[in-house]
Image: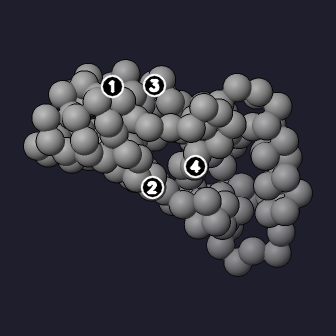
């Protein structure tokens, strides 16, 4: 079985956002998969997807502070046509990546106890984001 859909995320402020429920609730077809995988691909160059802490929101704010210090907006970048936050957003996106591959068993994604799907929004005004979700598996 293969199933693919585009998940449209609402606009989020710059930072890291736990989007596990938003993504998985958009995929009711997953309940039919006994063994398989879910591939998530973010169609943007200034945001990212990653897995991390799903409980304590201070982890997300600490992560944002780390990236703001490590890849500052006011760096010496040649690419600045779209604003001071654009090139740093591209760097952060490349560092973290834009896709995840997750195992599915008995209709559920097999995340660890404290793992959640994060969207890293690296632009101050990034707009809505699209994720292509591809389910593959047997029922």
Marks 3 and 4 in Cβ contact (< 8 Å): no
**Residue that label 4 marks:** 50
**Residue that label 3 marks:** 22
Q: Please tell me which of labels 2 and 1 falls first in the chain.
A: 1
Marks 1 and 3 in Cβ contact (< 8 Å): yes
Quick check: can you spot residue 6?
yes
**Residue that label 1 marks:** 26
Q: How far apart are labels 4 and 2 at the CA level?
A: 8 Å
Q: Please tell me which of labels 4 and 2 falls first in the chain.
A: 4
Q: How far apart are labels 1 and 3 at the CA level?
A: 7 Å
The secondary structure type at the circle numbered 4 is strand
| Left or right: 116 in relation to 56 | left
Q: Please tell me which of labels 3 and 4 falls first in the chain.
A: 3
Badge 2 density bin: few <14, some 14–19, many ≥20, Cα 10 Å: some
Rendered image quadrant of residue 61: top right
Q: How far apart are labels 1 and 4 at the CA level?
A: 18 Å
Residue 105 placed where, x, y %? Answer: 32, 36
Question: Which mark identifies residue 105?
Answer: none
The secondary structure type at the circle numbered 3 is helix
- Report the residue at 74% width, 58% height from top: 84
Badge 4 density bin: few <14, some 14–19, many ≥20, Cα 10 Å: some
**Residue that label 2 marks:** 99
Residue ranking furthest to the right? 69
């Amino acid at each position: 079985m293969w199933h693919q859909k585009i998940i449209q995320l609402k606009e989020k402020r710059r930072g890291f956002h736990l989007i596990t429920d938003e993504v998985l609730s958009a995929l009711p077809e997953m309940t039919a998969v006994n063994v398989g995988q879910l591939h998530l691909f973010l169609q943007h160059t200034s945001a990212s997807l990653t897995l991390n802490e799903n409980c304590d929101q201070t982890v997300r704010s600490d992560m944002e502070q780390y990236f703001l210090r490590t890849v500052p907006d006011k760096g010496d970048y040649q690419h600045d046509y779209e604003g001071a936050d654009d090139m740093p957003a591209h760097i952060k996106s490349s560092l973290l990546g834009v896709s995840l591959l997750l195992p599915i068993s008995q209709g559920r994604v097999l995340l660890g106890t404290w793992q959640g799907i994060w969207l890293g929004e690296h632009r101050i005004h990034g707009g809505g984001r699209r994720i292509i979700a591809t389910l593959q598996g047997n029922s």
